[in-house]
Amino acid sequence: MSLCQYTTQFGPCKNEAPEGFQYCETHNTIEKEQKERKKVFNYQLTRFKSRFEELSTNSALKTLSEEVGVLRMVLETCLNRCKDEHDLLLASTQISTLVNSIERLVMSTNKLDINLGQLLDRNKAIQLADEIIQIIVAEVQDEEAVAKVAAQITAAMNRITVAP
Ligand SMILES: [Zn+2]
């Protein structure tokens, strides 16, 4: 007979482990359960990752939203793993870290969303310039003047939209 190898929050377990076993009967079960939970958790994490890789995109906004989704799923899994108050207490640091991360990401996403909404994108700017030229063509009879105005608008557009 040897002592159980399990370390509790109060120090090493003082129970004896049965012959050929590393842990006492109680901790043998706990150890097995924790390994099983870790396996399930890792499996779920892999599944989340592959699901989000399928949705991969270049858009910064889409990426941020996806990250919020992943974090929410991790939080949900984390909460589901807690069977009682003791589990919840043990996981409290992890849970509050997750909640804070989600909050920060949601704020960034909202900010980016507003910024994108207020920006006139390149294609829309080019479309606007085209429409301005059409208006001038329709209203101004002097073809030479129209040609000059159109050239200046085009030049201005190129200056503004040269950067992608
Ligand atoms: Zn033990």
Image: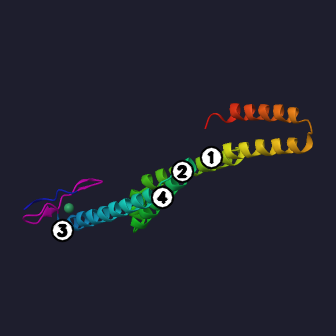
Residue position marked by numbered label 2 in the rendering: 64
For ligand 1, the image quadrant comes to bottom left
Which residue sits at x=18%, y=58%? 14
Q: Which comes sooner in the sequence, label 1 or label 3?
A: 3
Element assignment for label 4: loop
Disc 3 crowd rating (10 Å Cα; few below 14, some 14-19, many 20+) is some
- Three-letter amino acid code at disc 2? Leu
- Mark sitting on residue 66: none
- Three-letter amino acid code at disc 4? Leu
Return the residue found at the far front: 143
Contact between marks 1 and 2 (CB within 8 A): the answer is yes
> In terms of secondary structure, what is the magenta stretch mainly?
loop
Q: CA distance from mark 3 to mark 2?
A: 46 Å
Contact between marks 3 and 2 (CB within 8 A): the answer is no
Is the residue 76 above or below the residue 124 in the image? below
Q: CA distance from mark 1 to mark 2?
A: 9 Å
Per the image, is 21 magenta? yes
Q: CA distance from mark 1 to mark 3?
A: 54 Å
Q: Which comes sooner in the sequence, label 4 or label 3?
A: 3
Disc 2 crowd rating (10 Å Cα; few below 14, some 14-19, many 20+) is some
- Three-letter amino acid code at disc 1? Leu
Residue position marked by numbered label 4 in the rendering: 55
Q: CA distance from mark 1 to mark 4?
A: 19 Å
Q: Which residues are magenta?
A: 7-23
Which residue sits at x=48%, y=53%? 98
Whether ligand 1 has any atom under 8 Å from the Cβ at mark 3 is answered as yes
Where residue 30 appears, as percent x and y from the top left, is 26, 65
Disc 1 crowd rating (10 Å Cα; few below 14, some 14-19, many 20+) is some
Q: Which comes sooner in the sequence, label 1 or label 4?
A: 4
Residue position marked by numbered label 3 in the rendering: 25
Which residue sits at x=55%, y=49%? 59
